[in-house]
Amino acid sequence: MEIFEKIGDAASKTYKFTAEKTSKIAKETKKRMEISDYKKEIKDIYVEIGETVYEKYVTDQELNLEELQEKCERIQELSDKIVVCKDEILTLKERKQCKNCYEEIELSANYCPNCGCEQERISEEPSESSEEKENTKEDENLEKEEKLEEKTDNNEEE
Ligand SMILES: [Zn+2]
């Protein structure tokens, strides 16, 4: 009786392990699909921007960059999302990217085996909320940068 219990136990552990692995692969696939959707949307926006620019050229109208601002902002938004997805994929694979050469390396590596660059020590469990906070900060910085750019644009016109 006991031996069967043990077999059952081992089997359920194997099942649990496989299920976990499968769910990780499924999550990775989902992230990769998400990335390709974002990339497709970026390409579509590039086309739209191109069409707008060409239309202006053909009709001999002046191109006001502000008209393209919304589209450019959307591209930036999508690019940020791609970066987040890529990070999430690395986390799923329990890998990280070298800050210097961008080589994919072991999560526990303190030095990059490719370029030898010292790596930041990763804290035990980065919480999702801190990630969100970081994103908000980035967005704020982006907004500031854009405002600065607007100002510079205006100055150039004067
Ligand atoms: Zn490196």
Image (spheres, helix red, strand yellow):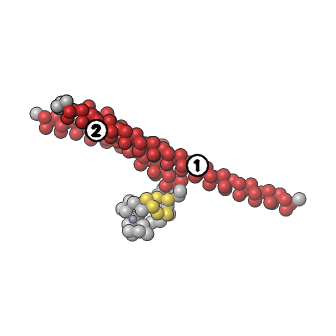
Question: On the picture, is 8 further left or further right than 121?
Answer: right
Residue 128 picture location, percent across and down: 49, 45
Which three-letter amino acid code belongs to the residue tagged 2?
Answer: Gly
- Residue corresponding to mark 2: 50
Which three-letter amino acid code belongs to the residue tagged 1?
Answer: Ala
Q: Is residue 90 above or below residue 142?
A: below
Frontmost of labels 1 and 2 is 2
Residue 9 picture location, percent across and down: 77, 57
Dot 1 falls on a residue whose secondary structure is helix
Residue 121 picture location, percent across and down: 45, 60
Question: On the picture, is 57 further left or further right than 112?
Answer: left
Label at residue 26: 1
Quadrant placement of the N terminus: bottom right
Which image quarter: residue 40? top left
Q: Which residue is at the front of the view, 86 or 55?
A: 55
Dot 2 falls on a residue whose secondary structure is helix
Q: Which residue is at the front of the view, 142 or 89?
A: 89
Instruction: Tell me, yes or no, if residue 130 can be seen here.
Output: no
Question: On the picture, is 72 further left or further right than 61?
Answer: right
